[in-house]
Amino acid sequence: MNALKAIILAGGLTVILLLGVATFNYNIDPMCFYQCEKVELGKTTLNTYYQVAQKIFAHPKAEIVILGSSRGQTTPPLWIEKETGHQTLNLSMGGAELSAKMAFLNIAIEQTKVKKVLWFADYFELLSELADVKIKSTPALRSYLATDQDHSKLSHILSDIIGLIDHNTLEASFYSLEHSSQSQLDQGTGSGLDFDRCQSENYQGEKSNREMEKEIGFSYDTYSRKILRPEQSKKAWIQFVNKLEFLNSKNIDVVIIIPPYNPIFSSRLANQYPEIFARHRKWIDDLKNLKISRIKVVDYFNSIPNDDGTPRYWNDGVHFTCRGAIEMLKHEI
């Protein structure tokens, strides 16, 4: 066999292999990128964004929604429901930035009776106006993104083709075959929290002091060296304000909660990166200066009420416990 025939044979085998991988991934569709044109409650998927959408569709009577990143996930929606008498969904999700929060909110406005939004605001949610690929690549969710997102058919086609042969998709397909259980259609993150225990004087948190201090160090290194470095996007800020004005026009109340960092984390950030800390302060001032009638801004950036800096209130440098969440919200719901 000469060199040319060997190259042609190798190329042909490669094409056959890629087609086989693409066909397998398309049929399994672990991330709901190809066969999920609408949100279906019985659909199993590894796509966490789609799972959040399923929970919204499963609770059409919800009147209060919580929006947040992982920092909002320790808020018990059933505690708010008990206190207010209004069905509550916690749509917080790890890594959720502005476009994800707005997409979830758009779904909730369409599918529920939402009257109030509790928005855990993160400085880093405004670092980009671009949507996560897992939303942009999911047909059932794409329409809920901001109108100025990239909706180019060509870009979606190219992204779909690349995704079909991506090794991450292949790994997800195999994982999906082994873990095919349906996601729980509860009321979102924090649904399983024992909120009576969180409020108890005997509550000591989930970690020891040593574990928490170690986690503070890890989170500080990650956030100070990477996550908090970029400046906020002006375009994202405009999108955020426009969404608040839209909610105001729909007579939907919004409470924007500005949570703090752990006292040790905050002190280190202020001392070692004063320029980043100053940008936080400006962002907070901008929020407070918003003149929209149904928007209330609650500033806890300096401290959670009654915070003693222990694991009762903190899991690490940025994530507060259920007790911390309740302390910030108990006078705002």
Image: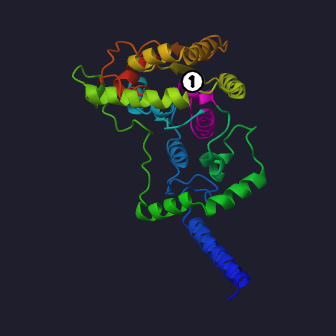
Q: What residue do we see at 39% from left, 32% from top?
A: 78
Few, some or many residues within 10 Å of mark 1 (<14, 14–19, 20+):
some
Residue 296: horizontal and vertical position, in percent?
57, 15
Label 1 secondary element = helix
Splitting the image into 4 quarters, where does residue 236 fall?
top right
114 vs 288, nearest the viewer:
288
In this figure, which residue is indicated by the disc labeled 1?
Answer: 123
Q: What residue do we see at 33% from left, 17% from top?
A: 309
Magenta segment main secondary structure: helix
Q: What residue do we see at 34% from left, 22% from top?
A: 313
Quarter occupied by the N terminus: bottom right
Above or below, 55 against 254 in this view is: below
The span shown in magenta is 98-127
29 vs 51, nearest the viewer:
29
Residue 121 sits inside the magenta stretch: yes
Residue 215: horizontal and vertical position, in percent?
36, 30
Q: What residue do we see at 57% from left, 34% from top?
A: 113
- The amino acid type, in three-letter code, at marker 1 is Tyr
169 vs 17, nearest the viewer:
17
Above or below, 112 against 21 in this view is: above
Residue 254: horizontal and vertical position, in percent?
57, 22
Which residue in the rendered view is the most extreme toward the bottom? 1
Q: Is residue 100 left or right of residue 305?
A: right
One can see residue 87 in this view: no
